[in-house]
Each structure stands twice: as structure tokens, then as C-alpha cells.
Image (cartoon, grey):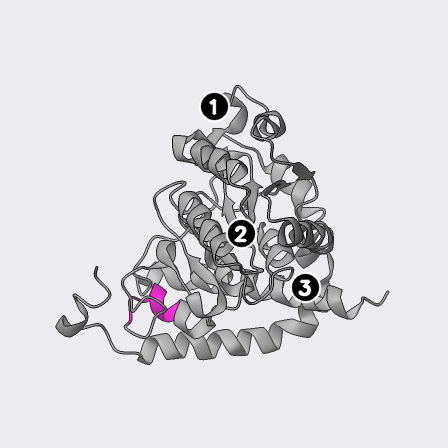
Amino acid sequence: MGHSRIYEEFFYSALRIRLVEERIIELYPSDKIQSPVHLSIGQESVAVGICHSLLPSDLLFATYRSHAFYLAKGGDIRKLFAELYGKVTGCCQGKGGSMHLAAPDVGFMGTSAVVASTIPQAVGAALAAKYLGKKQVIVVVFGDGAMDEGVYHESLNFAALHKLPIFFIFENNGLAVHSPIESRHSFSTSDHVKAYGIPVVHIAEGSDFEKVHTIVSEILAHVRDTCVPYFIEIQTYRYKEHVGVAEDYEAGYRSRESLKKWQEHDPLIIDKDLVAKYRPAIEKEIDEAVQFAEESPWPDKRHLLEDVI
């Protein structure tokens, strides 16, 4: 059965993210990667569905699980690997590492290891966009751990009160590190968001990049036209441990049965023909990016205080 051009475009983007992270897994034991890593394997469709809905002028703020969103928004793959290697040619000159990627030239405004810290930054950007009269939507992605922070609730209130063009996206993999959401939240997500006067949509099929794209695109158009905030919850599942490149199903907080349930709907596992079609070109691109990182220079003393405010 043939696929549409747009489906194959989404598939290519998602597969590219997964193969990049699988290469990170291969490289990590060598200690060439100078940073802790939080992998998005299993969650690629969320980033692809969202970022393919955005205009180049739209700004995206993400979490420290950032590789997928960086690549899907248009971040340079060579600069990604160079940053992971701690090289001066990285997107943050080797100073940020995996958890602090940024590519403002493509509207990827940065990530942070501090949980929930990019949410008020995104609200500030939305306030600026409104006052400057830009037809621009600000998107901020976060997990359920961020919802435990007071600044998250303050940001929702401020965005609703001032009618800001911001799209809150809750990437729900059900866990904050090892803690399930039901052990930490006494509230319903949809109920508490609606209490701030913000509309809420829920997508259960987070592995379906076409569905994510369709729903997100419609909401983005609404936010752009009306200049009001919106909230979407997307269910997803991370295949690897919270931080690192291994699996952790023996830790006891989740089961392999839950993994298999999500893998049954994973297009990157199901569609072996498309994987075979696109893997060679993507692997070649990754090889070249890794070589670029290997050959790039280290920062020296003159870079120490650059970009420091």
C-alpha cells in the first residue's frame, strides 16, 4: 500500500530523529559525548507533528529532552553532534550540551535542565509578539513534571488574563523521572486548565504524526487569528530510561508490556519498507555530522566569557 507524500515526509523526519539518537547510543560508551542525554526514542511523532505545523517565524521553547524538537524545527544536525561533543562548532559553542540546545535562526529558542523554566520565557515571548503586532505563535512544550511547579500555573493564568498567542503543549509520557502522574497530581489536567479559561484538546494517539499534525495545525490557525492561548495534551511513551542510553524496565516502575503496547502502533517499527528506503540517506548524513564533530576544534580560553551576560 502506497503512502502520501506528506506521510513520507513525516516518516522521514521521525526516522531521522530516531537514527540520530540510536547513533548517540552507539557513541555514548566512548565518552566522546560530553553531556548527559535525555532521549526521545518513542516520542518522535509528537515533535514531527508539531514542528511541521509551524511557520518559520513561530518560536518554539522545549524541555531538556530536546533532540527531537531541535531537529524537527530545523536545527543543524552537524551543530547538534558538535554540541554533544563539546566542540566550539556546536549550536551553543560546546557550552550547552544536550540539555541546552538552541537554534534561534530557525525559531528554536532553547531548552533548559531546570524543569518548567522555559514556560515563563515562552509567555514573555508571546507578550512581546502581541505588543509588536506580529502574526506569530509561541509554542512551549513540557512534561507532567513541569506541572508540579508554581511558575507553570502562574504562566497559564498570565497568558489567559492577557490573551496571549501561546500554545501550551503537554507532552505526556506519564512519568516525571520514575514517578507516575497519578502519584503526584490530585487534579485533572483538563479541569485545571479550563479553570484558567484556556481551551483544552487531548490526543491519545501520540505515535500518529499525521493526527498530531492535523489537530495542531487547526489549533495554531485559531491561536494566530484570535491571539488567545490554547492547551493540548498529547499521550506518548519514552522507550529508554529517563536520562542515559539504556533501558530500565527492571527498575520496577513500569513494564515491558506497556512498551509493547506502544510499539504495536509505532510507524518506525511497523513500516519496514520505508525504513529500508530512507535509512541509507539518513545514515550518510549522520556519518558526515559525526565526522564534522570529530574534526571540529575544542573551545579555548578566548571562548570562555563569550555570550555571557
Give the quadrant of the C terminus.
Answer: bottom left
Magenta segment: does it hold 178? no
Of discs 1 and 2, which sits in the foreground? 2
Query: Which label's residue is closer to the chain start, 2 or 3?
Result: 3
Circle 3 SS class = helix
Mark 1 and mark 2 residues within 8 Å of each other at the beta carbon? no
Magenta segment: does it hold 82? yes
Q: Residue furthest left?
A: 301
* Residue that label 1 marks: 184
The residue closer to the viewer here, 23 or 73, is 73
Circle 1 SS class = loop
* Image vertical order of residue 55 relative to residue 194, above or below: below
Residue at image coords 32%, 75%: 89
Q: Which residues are magenta?
A: 81-87
* Residue that label 2 marks: 139
Pointer 2 local density, CA inside 10 Å: few below 14, some 14–19, many at least 20: many
Pointer 3 local density, CA inside 10 Å: few below 14, some 14–19, many at least 20: many
Of discs 2 and 3, which sits in the foreground? 2
Circle 2 SS class = strand
Query: Which label's residue is closer to the chain start, 1 or 3?
Result: 3
Asked whether, in this view, residue 209 is left or right of residue 112, the answer is: right
Pointer 1 local density, CA inside 10 Å: few below 14, some 14–19, many at least 20: some
Percent from the top left, x then y, of residue 265?
A: 72, 48
Amino acid at circle 2:
Val
Q: Residue 11, which numbered label?
A: 3
Of discs 1 and 3, which sits in the foreground? 1
Amino acid at circle 1:
Arg
